[in-house]
Amino acid sequence: MSRKQEIQNEALLMMKEMGFAGMTMRGLAKKLGIEAPSLYNHLKSKDDLLIEVCSDIALQLETQILEVNDIYFNAIDKLKMAIQGHVNVLTQNITASYVFVNEWRFLPSNEKEIFIQRRDKYESEFRRILELGINEGNLQFQDVKITSLTLLSALNSIVDWFHPDGDLSSDEVAKQLFQFVGSGIKNETEIHW
C-alpha cells in the first residue's frame, strides 16, 4: 500500500469516527505523526477525498445496476443480481462506504448536486426492476418508490454493522437480504437464491 493510500485510509477512518465536520487535516497530520505541510503532498483537502470517495463508489454502483438492467432476465433474477452487486460494492471497503453513505451531505454544493442526480438515477434503475416484477406478476407491493427506498436503506445500512472478518461473508449478507426482501414483496412464488 502506498503512503498516499495509507493517509487516505486513515483520513476515512477519522471521518467515520468523527464525522466529516470533526475530521481536520491538522488532526490527521498529528495522528499520522507528520507535519501538516507534508500531509498536503499526499492529500490536498478532506473535501477532495470526500469527492473522490463518493464519485468512485457512485460509479461502481451505477455500473453494476446498468449492467443488471441491460440483461434480459426476469425481475427476480435482476433483483438478486442488483442486491448482490450493491452489497459487493459497499463491502469492498466498508470504511469508505460508510463515508459514502453517511457523509455525502458535506460535499461542496456543485458536487452535491451531481451526487444527488447520480443517486436519483440509481434509485430509478432499482425501481425499473421492481416495476418489471409487477408487470411480470412476480412482485406485489403498494408503492414502488417506497419499496425501492426501503430496500436501498436496508442495503445501505450494512455499512453500520458489516465486518469483513465477521460471521457472515458479503455473499451471505446479500443472500439473506434478498430472501428477506423477497419474502415481503413476492407474489405467491418462492424466492430462491
Image (spheres, rainbow, N blue to C red):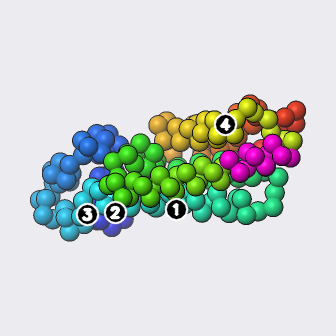
Instruction: Between label 1 and label 4, give the one nearer the viewer.
Output: 4
SS assignment at label 1: helix
Look at mark 4 in the image and give the residue it sits on. Answer: 147
Of badges 1 and 2, nearer the viewer stands 1
Secondary structure at badge 3 equals loop
Q: What type is the residue that disc 3 sits on?
A: Leu
x 38%, y 58%: residue = 111
Q: What residue is shown at x 50% (from left), y 55% (from top)?
A: 117
- Foreground: disc 2 or disc 3: 3
- Give the side of residue 155 with respect to residue 44, left or right: right
Name the amino acid type tagged 1: Leu
3 or 1: mark nearer the eye: 1
The part of the image, by quadrant, that contains residue 98 is top left
| Tag 4–tag 2 contact (CB < 8 Å) | no
Circle 4 residues within 10 Å: few <14, some 14–19, many ≥20? some
Q: Residue at x 75, y 33 (%)?
A: 141
Q: Position of residue 25 (x, y in %)?
A: 19, 53
Q: Which mark is residue 5?
A: 2
Find the distance from the CA under tag 1 to the CA under tag 4: 23 Å
Three-letter amino acid code of the residue under disc 4: Thr
Vertical position of residue 81 compared to residue 152: above or below: below
Q: Which residue is mark 1?
A: 59
Answer with mark 4 or mark 2, whichever residue precedes in sequence: 2
Specify the label residue 156 is tagged with.
none
Q: How far across and down, in percent of the image, does residue 40 sit?
A: 19, 64
In the rendered view, does 32 fall on the left or right side of 54? left
At 24% across and 64% down in the image, what residue appears? 44
Residue marked by disc 3: 43
Q: Which residues are magenta?
A: 127-136
